[in-house]
Image (spheres, grey):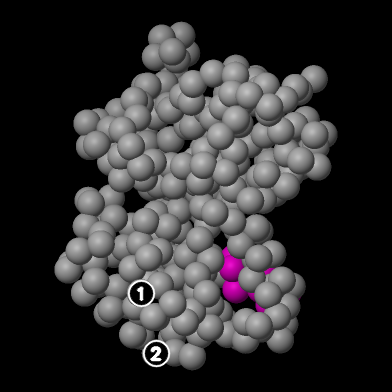
Amino acid sequence: MKNNNQPIGIFDSGIGGLTVANAVSKLLPNEQLIYFGDTAHMPYGDKSKELIRSYATTITDFLLYQKKCKAIVIACNTASAAAYEVLRDHYKGVVPVINVIDPMIEAVIADDDIKKVGIIATKTTVTSSVYQEKLTRRKPTLNYSAFATPLLASMIEEGFYNNNISHAVLKQYLENDALNGIDALVLACTHYPLIKNEIAAFYNNQVKIFDSAEVVAQKLKLVLEKEELLSNSKAGEDVFYVSDYTESFERATKIFFGHKINLSLCNIWKRNDEGDE
């Protein structure tokens, strides 16, 4: 039986999903967050769907049964594409599961002013065609163009954003013919909210930017309201787990979450793991 004071579980293949956790924290300050970054298995993009589903199920079981989370957010495009339907069906009636793709699709198709939307993402997400297929099915009249921007995620992880290097890389990508004539742009990677302002400036604020972190946080709020699960006061401190630890992950958390946080090592694939707390 879920109650309002239970935490929200958020997971990603690494630490990029901390942008989603940060947006949730700002929008819903009364909610306690339990974050799990599967850094031992990152990146998910070169893994099979079956393996990603296995990881996602193990992580969800950990968040649900050990950490007693009242809702699960898949803060990763690859995991959302590969595992969302499996998790949704498996935990139906047990816990709401939110992914990062469907809320973005819903936000885009709800705006009738948009005639052509661009989608920028990693190669894996673009080649999966998940955004293209969903947009075609949900709104056949909408024009879209998906374009892989493979350097952006690693550039952001290394701290290169809002500077001359990121300006140059973004200019090279955004001037591509694939993105000509767009009036909206979907940032289909949880790293990209960190360069949202740079992208908006490139388009002189004339293109509507869909930020996955903000859109998913809003969707989560709606789901919690519908399920009557919103918390009135924060039950405890946010906790951030990773399945493998390096100092570079610790340093990078400040980039994604806005301020320094402490990572706890928690390898949920090892029995008798003592790194749980």
Name which residue lies at 52% across and 38% down: 25
Amino acid tagged 1: Ala
Q: Helix, strand or loop at disc 1?
A: helix
Q: Which residues are magenta?
A: 130-137
- Residue 108's x, y, as percent? 64, 71
Q: Left or right: where does residue 264 sit relative to residue 70?
A: left
Image quadrant where one finds the C terminus = top left
User: Looking at the figure, which quarter contains the N terminus?
Assistant: top right
- Mark identifier at residue 177: 2
Q: Distance from label 2 to label 1 (Cα)?
A: 19 Å
Mark 2 vs 1: CB contact within 8 A:
no
Q: Residue furthest left?
A: 164
Of the numbered discs 2 and 1, the one sitting upstream in the chain is 2
State the residue at coordinates (66%, 45%).
220
- The residue mark sitting in front, 2 or 1, is 1
87 sits left or right of 225 in the view: left
Looking at the image, is 229 positioned above or below residue 22?
above
Residue 23 sits above or below residue 72 on the image: below
Place of residue 242 in the rendered image (x, y in percent of width and height, measured from the top left): 39, 29
For residue 200, which quarter of the picture? Answer: bottom left
Identify the residue position indicated by label 1 in the image.
201
Residue 58 position, x and y percent, is 57, 29
Q: In the image, is 238 to the left or to the right of 60?
A: left
**Amino acid type shown at disc 2:** Asp
Using the rendered view, name the quadrant where residue 135 is placed: bottom right
**Dot 2: element:** helix
Up-down: is 250 above or below 115? above
Main secondary structure along the magenta-highlighted residues:
helix
Residue 178 shows which numbered tag?
Answer: none
